[in-house]
Amino acid sequence: MARDWEMAYEQNETPWDKGYASPPLLEFLQQNPILGRVLVPGCGTGHDVRALAAQGAQVLGLDVAPSAVRKALAFPCVRDERYEAGDFLNLDAGHCAAYDWVVEHTCLCALDPCERVAYARAVQQALKPGGYYLAVFYREVSDYTGDGPPHPITPAESHALFAPVFEPLEAFVPAQGYASRPVGSEEVCLWRKM
Ligand SMILES: C[S@@+](CC[C@H](N)C(=O)[O-])C[C@H]1O[C@@H](n2cnc3c(N)ncnc32)[C@H](O)[C@@H]1O
């Protein structure tokens, strides 16, 4: 059954929110600054958005749950970040070909696997030609039985989803992660829209 994201934020039942940005994303940023216009789909309360803004990007955090956006807006502004309530799978025209980067962390795994093709189409729509898609993919979810979210995605599945339109540039298993996500359960992948 689809999760009611708005109710989760209203009731503070958000175990995925660790209170700080994704360690694999921070690890990537240590070596590769991300600049320009950045979209973070499924941004939740915005920890990744603020980490990206702090190092100089113009960032939009988009989330389908208005209460997530309200909570994100309650944090002090870091630099050039904005938030918007909306459905990433149904982007407004204003978001199309508007971004240099789409940064993914725990949005794809939150969707039903049958929505993945629509998600990949949205990434493609949002990016400018030659834009970058940086993803922290959830490769292994402990005790996963098919009931999600989160839903892990295998390398073969992500390749099938993105390779037709995106060129893979880099992939690595991050050395750092949240305590609840052991090393090896996540992979950082960088793609460029062709
Ligand atoms: C597992 S949470 C992760 C939130 C945040 N990335 C974090 O790590 O704290 C998944 C997020 O995706 C959002 N979401 C789910 N479906 C979405 C959609 N179609 N468009 C935009 N956001 C969506 C949810 O509201 C939720 O905030």
Image (spheres, helix red, strand yellow):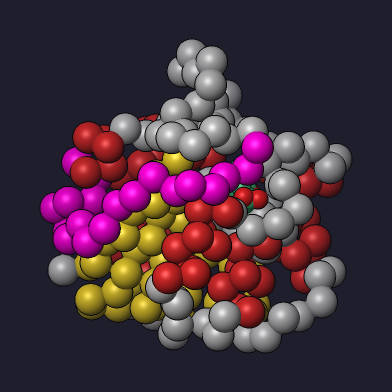
> In which quadrant of the rendered view does residue 53 lie?
bottom right
> In which quadrant of the rendered view does residue 108 lie?
top left
| Residue projecting furthest to the front | 175
Relative image position of residue 94 (x, y in whole percent): 45, 79
Q: Is residue 172 magenta?
A: yes
Q: Residue at x 66, y 55 (%)?
A: 44
Relative image position of residue 26 (x, y in whole percent): 55, 62
* Quadrant occupied by the C terminus: bottom left
Relative image position of residue 86 (x, y in whole percent): 58, 61
Q: How many marks?
A: 0
Relative image position of residue 95 (x, y in whole percent): 44, 74
Q: Residue at x 44, y 28 (%)?
A: 140
User: Would residue 88 be visible to someone looking at this image?
Assistant: no
> In which quadrant of the rendered view does residue 32 lie?
bottom left
* Quadrant occupied by the N terminus: top right
User: Would residue 192 be visible to someone looking at this image?
Assistant: yes
Q: Nearer the viewer, residue 191 or 73?
A: 191
Range of residues picked out in magenta: 160-179
Q: Residue at x 49, y 13 (%)?
A: 145
Q: Nearer the viewer, residue 92 or 114?
A: 114
Q: Is residue 115 magenta?
A: no
Left or right relative to 193: residue 55: right
- Vertical order, 47 against 76 (above or below): above
Q: Residue at x 53, y 21 (%)?
A: 142
